[in-house]
Amino acid sequence: MDRIRISFRLNGVEREAFVSPEERLLDMLRDDMGMKSVKEGCGTGDCGTCTVLVNGKPVLSCIMPAFQARGKEITTLEGLNEDSAMKVIQDKFREYHAAQCGFCTPAMEIVGYKLIKESDGVPSKEEVKEGISGVLCRCTGYYDIVDALRSAAEVIKK
Amino acid sequence: MSVSVEEFIGELQRKAERGELLYIGQSLRRIDDLEKVLGKPIYTNDLLPRETLYARLVLSKQPHAILKGIGVARAISYPTVKAVLTYQDIPGENISSTIIPDRPLFAFEKVRSTGDIVAAVIAENERRAAEATELVDVQYEPLPAVFDPIEAMKPDAPKVHSEGNVIKHMKVRKGDVEKGFQDSDIIVENTFRTQFQDAVPLEAETALAIPRDNGKLLIIGSMQTPHHVQAAVARVLGRPLEDIEVIQAVTGGAFGPKSDEPPYDVSSIAALGAIKTGRPVLMSMTRKESMIAHTKRHPAIIHHKTGVKSNGRLVASEVQIVLDGGAYASLGVLVIVRATFHANGPYDIPNVKNDGYKVYTNNTYTGSFRGFGAPQAIFAAEAQMDEIARKLNMDPLDLRLMNMLRPGSRTSTGQLMDDSCGLPECVDAVVSASNYREKRREYSQQSGKVRRGIGIAMLHHGNALGPEGNDYAYVHLSVEKNGRVHLGTALTEYGTGAVSGLAQIAASVLGIPLDYFVLDRPDTLAHHETGATVASRVTAIGGNAARDAAMKLKERATAVAARLLGVSPSDVRIVDGLAFVSGNPKRTVSWEEVVRAAYESGVELSVIGYYMAPQCVWDQETGLGSPYNQYTFGAAVAEVEVDVETGQYRVLNYYVAFDVGKAINPKNVIGQLYGGSVQGIGYAMMEELVHVNGKVVNPNLKDYYIPTSMDVPERMVPIIVEKPGSMGVYGAKIIAEPPIVLPAPAIRNAIMNAIGDGVNDLPITAEKVYRKAKELGLG
C-alpha cells in the first residue's frame, strides 16, 4: 500500500515519517517515534489516555490518522518532562498521590498542563474537573488529581 | 532552616522513642510513582522487543453450541500471519482455570459463552492479525441456551456443563429462623437485583512471551499473581514450572479480574505463540475483547425475608442469593462464600438462614472483582434495612443503631465482636459530618420538582482471605553495598501504593528513610510463591512479612553497628539512617557505614520475612464460627438531589468513614476511599454490561459508562477511624475493596428519602427513578 511521506514537529524537533493511510497517530508516536507515554486504553476515542497536544490542543491520538500530523506540532509528555510547569505538576501528582496505577497519568498531566497554561490565575475545582473530563481514571476518583492540579497551578501562577 | 547540634540530637532521641513505629501513620510519598508521572516505558506494551509478533482472538459467535469445525487454512495463508492457534496446538492440558478445571483455554467440542476463545491468530502486526481472525471459519451447531440463573437452577434447564448448573451452594444456619419469624411482629420481604459490572482497568489484559535460548520462556504481563500465571502456563505447555519465568510489569489497574483467569489466557496464548514461532509474542486484549472475554462482577438476584419486633429489633433473617456465574466457575466459587457470609449486613441477628448459589448460565463468565460478592450482598441488606424502617415508621439510622455490630455483639456466624469493632465510631463520624438528623427532618417535607434526600449504609467486611485460602506472605529484603535496600515480593502493586507501604513498614522498623528503598519487580524466579494478591491483603498480611524481614535484617545491622560503636547491640538505636548509642546520640555511624562494615565482615544483609495468619475456624455445613480473623467496618451517607420530572439525579455530598485498624499511610487510605467510592458510584448509578441472549451489546467505553470527573459528587468527605485489629500489621485492617460497596445502598436509600420509594435493581438510572416517580404520582 502507498505510504505517505509527512513532516511535522514532535516535541520541538523536526521529524519525518512514512505512514500508511490507515495508520493511527497513536501507533506512529508509540511504535515509530518511541513516545511510550502515549497510552492506548480503548482504541475508540472514549478513554482519553492517548491524549497528546496537536498545535497546542488536546487530541485523541487513537482516532487521528497519522498523516494528518503533516505540518503540525505534536507534543507528548516526553517533550514536557523538562518544562518547569510540568515539573511542578509531576511533583504535585506525587505529593497528592494522584498517580495510582499511572496509566492515565501522562494524559491527565497533559490536559492539566494545558488547562493551567491557558487559565488566568488558579482554575477553580469545577474548571479543573471540566478540563480533565476527557480523560478517564479508574483508580483515584479524580479528587487527588484535581487537588494536585490546583496546587500546581498555585505554584505556577505565583 | 538550620538546627543546632543539640536540637538535632534531641530530635534523634525523641524519634528513637517511637521505636519501630518511626514512620508508621505518616503520609509518606510513594516510591513507585516517579516513572509513572514521567510517562516512562514501564507497562507491558511499552517493553516489546524487535521482532515481536501480535496475537488477536477469535471469540465464539454463539453462546452455546457444538463446535463442528474450525477452518484455519484461509487465515494461515493471509499476509504476515505466522500461526493460528486452536485447541489442537496445546501440548499440555487445555485448561485455563483457577479452582475448578472447567474452562478450556481454547474451545473444545463446544462453546458455552460468547466470551469463549476459539482460536488466536498471530501475525507481524496487530491489524493483519485482526483481519485474519475474520478468516477463521468456525462452524457451530447451536444448542439450547440458558441466560437466567433462576431458570438455570431448574432441573430441566439446558446444562452448561455435563453436571447440573449449580456450581456451589453455600449456607449459613444460625438459631431457628422459623421460630424467629413466629416471634416477630412484622415480616418484610423484598427481592433485589444487581447487574454485570466491568472492572475496566484502563490497561486491558496483556502479556508478552519471549522465547529464551535454552527453550525456556520469559513472560512479562499485567497481572495480580505471577506464580499462579506461571502454573497456568506450565499446565498448558506441559512444562515444569522452572521453564517459565513470569515477571509482573507495572500494571495499569487490575481490580480483581487480573487475579482471576484472564491473565492465564493472555499469558498462555502468548507462550504458545512464542514456542510455535520462536519469536516474542504479545497477546494484548483490545478493550472490546477484554469486556467480552474477561471476568465481570456477578449479577445477583437476592431475596430477603426479615422478621422484626415492632420496636425495631431484628429477630430473624433469611436470605437467598443467586449469582449468575456465566459459563465458568472462576474464582466465583469463593465470591459466593463471601457474599453469603455478609448477606445479612453488619447486624447482630439471633436467627439466620442464608443460602448462596453460584450458577452456570451461557452468559460470559463472572468472577473476582473488588468487593468479591460484598457489593451485591450489602446493597440488598442495606436496602432491606430501609424497607424495614419504612414499615416500622422508624428512622433508618435508629433501626441500624439498635441492631448494628458493636463490641460484644455477634455476627451471623456467631463470631463475637471484640474492641476492634469500630462500626459505632464510623456511624457517628458520618452522621455528624453530614448533619444527617437535621437534613432527614428537613427533607421529610418536600414538594415540587427538585427534591433532596439523604441516606445511610454500613458494612462489615471479613478481612483478607479467611475462608478463601491460606493467608501467608513472603517479603525479601536485600541490601546493596551502597546501602540501598531492595524490597522484593510476589505480592504485586497495581495502583494502591500498598507495596510502597511495605517498604514504609520495613523502613520504619529499620530506622532508615524510605528513599533508601528500591522496589524490585515481582518475579517468579526471584521471589517465593506468596499466595494471591487479592482480598486487599498486601498491607495487613504482607505488612507482617515485611516487618518480620526488617526485624531479621535489623538484628544483623544492629550487631554490626554495636561493634562500630563499641557497645552492646541492645544499646543501639537507628533513626533516620543514623545508628547511635541509646540516650547518647552525639556519636553516630551512618547506615552506609554499617552496611559497608557488614560487607567487609561477611555479614549477610539479605533476609526473607514470612507471615501466616491464624487459621479461621468455621463449620462447613452451618457456616458457624469465625470465618475471618478480623473485620473492617464502614459507614457512608449520601445526599442526593432528584428531579422528579425527569428522574435525573446527582450525588451532592458523600461522607464515608472506615475503621481501618491502623492507617499505615493515611494518604494511601484516603486514595482508596476516594477511588473505591467512585467506582461504587459507577456501580450504583450508571455501569451495566448488557447481555442480550448471551451477547454483550456494549463492550466499549462509549456505551458502557464509567464515572468521569464530571460525575463525581461535588464533595466527598473521607474519614479514617482506627480500632486496631488482631491480625494485621500494627493493627491494620484491609481497605482497598470495601469502599466500593457503600455507594449503591447509600444512594438508593437517599433517593428513597427524596421521593418516597427506592429502586431495587442496579444500576439506579435516571430512567428507573423517573418510572418510580411516575408510579408514586410525582412529577
Image: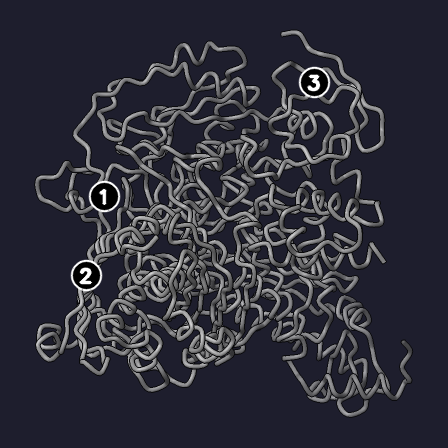
Give whichever of A54, B37 is nearer the camera. A54
**Vertical placement of B317 versus B410: above or below?**
above
The residue positioned 68% from the left and 25% from the top of the image is A28
**Residue B92 pos. (x, y %):** 36, 34
Q: Is residue B521 left or right of residue B4?
A: left
The residue positioned 47% from the left and 26% from the top of the image is B56
Query: Which comes sooner in the sequence, label 2 or label 1?
Result: 2
Question: Mark 2 is on which residue type?
Answer: Asp
Distance from disc 2 to disc 1, alpha carbons, whole Å, reads 16 Å
Q: Nearer the viewer, mark 3 or mark 1?
A: 3
Q: Which mark is residue B355?
A: 2
Colour style of the rendered protein structure = one colour
Give whichever of B394, B14 is nearer the camera. B394
Q: Identify the subunit bearing mark 2.
A: B
* Quarter location, residue B1: bottom right
Q: Identify the subunit bearing mark 1.
A: B
* Quarter location, residue B607: bottom right
The residue positioned 8% from the left and 76% from the top of the image is B182
Give whichever of A141, B491 is nearer the camera. A141
**Vertical placement of B697 versus B311: above or below?**
above
Q: Residues within 10 Å of mark 2 (few under 14, many from 20)?
A: many
Question: Mark 3 is on which residue type?
Answer: Phe
Residue extending farthest front = B448
Q: Identify the subunit bearing mark 3.
A: A
Q: Which mark is residue A67?
A: 3
Distance from disc 3 to disc 1, alpha carbons, whole Å, reads 49 Å
**Residue B63 pos. (x, y %):** 27, 30
**Residue B587 pos. (x, y %):** 86, 84
Asked if residue B523 can be seen in this view, the reply is no
Give whichever of A68, B464 is nearer the camera. A68
Q: Residues within 10 Å of mark 3 (few under 14, many from 20)?
A: many
Q: Nearer the viewer, mark 3 or mark 2?
A: 3
